[in-house]
Amino acid sequence: MSFPTVTSLPWRREVLAILHLAVPLALTQLAHMAIVTTDVFMMGWIGPEALAAGTLSGHFYWVFVAFVMGTLTGATPIMAQHLGARRFRHIRPVVRNAAWLCLLLAAMVGLVAWFSGTILTSLGQEEPIAASGQSYLRHMVWGLLPGLWLVVLSEFLVAHARPQAVLVVTILGIGLNALLDYALMFGNLGAPEMGLDGAGVASALVNLFMFSALLIYVMCDRRLRRYRLMGRFWKIDWAAMREIARVGLPIAVTEVAEMGMFVTTSLMMGLLGTQALAAHGVTATCYGVIFMIPVGLAQAGAVRVGRAVGAGQARSAALSGWTVIAMSGLVALIPAGLFWLAGTEIAGLILDPEVPGNAATVSLAASLLSVAAFFMIADAIQITARGALQGMKDTAIPMVMALAASWGIGLPVAVLLGFKLDLGGQGIWVGLAVAMIAASLLLVWRFSQKTRKL
């Protein structure tokens, strides 16, 4: 009697396939964070006013950009299912109409960015800070459309299990962004000194470079150029565009709602004082960097499940989904353990505990990291379960579940524990934990139900 070798087991092949996608995707997410971090550091070199203006306007702008990018994410499972079903001629219309959708969405976001100073001033922000931020966004917004087209091309490559090119282009973008910031913000290398506006120009040029580089790669690659993505580019298929919006809009609403939840918790921490808000910022930063790993796994899961569904392989779709959910939960055990056992040391990497006044903040941040350790696994599971459901083009019900868990359960618990029961910052983060645990249970149940119906 012969037994299957480890390398022949289906789950082993699935793990390797997911890692092939997820590792470069997670690194790409981290690379994008590095670009943003470079901007923030150099804004700080100009002065606190520039940093405040850039941070305020940037956060305002990225809420709208995140909504647009979430909407465009709807193209990924559509392309994955077409590839699984070997409907190769359907790929170009998806890319083309996603690109036209970018044009419509960019126009709306660009209008908001152009008059952001007026909007922020009406919301009670200081007029000089809002005006400076508006000028920064007016320079940055010229790179919005190529940046969105970059997203579409990235999804095209991810659906084909070719994310490495996206990673390479993004890493090149880090270096170019740092160079342009150095030149345009401070007047180095013969460039004019533009201050904060220079960061906006740099961002626009970097987006244009990354999109152009990725487009050249797609047009020159022996296999990908067969799609002739630029062919009949003027032809708009409203039905195809509506399908992208139908799948993508719930994703966009979910992502913006989650951003809103964290903004709300930041405001709640601010009510507890500067020290609590600073500790929250340290914890959120550490958590955000680590969370890029489950995000990469979720994107990989969406593609793997989508291709299996398109091919009519119900067992493979279930295997892909359950494998990526299990992988995400297991991988999250490592940072969760570090947060629990070495929270003080991790917080000390951002705030020096030896500096007078920092010790109490570091201690509070360590206590918040210990709470984060409990729900990181649940958060990793819920994001990958959501990705697996996206592969099935099931996004509306998961959106409702995510909103119910965060806004209907998590935030009320955070208010109750943080303020009514006087547990402070730890109570607020326990509320976040409750939200993530509830979301993971609901989304895993939803995926289980969907796989049974395949």
Image (cartoon, rainbow, N blue to C red):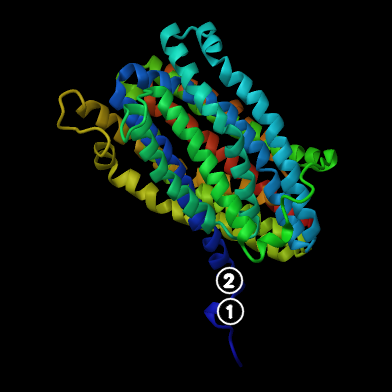
Note whether 258 is above or below 383 in the view shown: above
- For mark 1, what is the residue? 8
Mark on residue 76?
A: none
- Give coordinates of residue 15: x percent, y percent: 55, 65
- Residue 169, horizontal then vertical, whole percent: 49, 51
In the displayed structure, 131 sits above or below 178; it is above
The N terminus - image quarter: bottom right
- Residue 58 makes an appearance in the image: yes
Residue at 83% across, 41% down: 237
Q: Is 115 or 332 nearer to us in this picture?
A: 115
Residue 292 vs residue 234: left or right? Answer: left
Tell me which numbered mark, 2 or 1, is placed earlier along the sequence.
1
Q: CA distance from mark 2 to mark 1?
A: 7 Å
Q: Residue at x 76, y 42 (%)?
A: 97
Q: Residue at x 27, y 35 (%)?
A: 350
Q: Which residue is mark 2?
A: 13
Identify the residue shown where x is 40% and y is 21%: 269
Q: Position of residue 197 (x, y in %)?
A: 43, 23
**Front position in the image: 439 or 146:** 146
- Which structural element holds mark 2? helix
Query: Are the two marked residues, 2 and 1, in contact with CB atoms closer than 8 angstroms?
Result: yes
Q: In screen coordinates, is 211 left or right of 426?
A: right
- 400 or 308, which lies in front? 308
Vertical arrangement, residue 2 with respect to residue 241, above or below:
below
Badge 2 density bin: few <14, some 14–19, many ≥20, Cα 10 Å = few
- Front residue of 126/50: it is 50
Q: Amino acid at mark 1?
A: Ser
Extreme residue in the bottom direction: 1
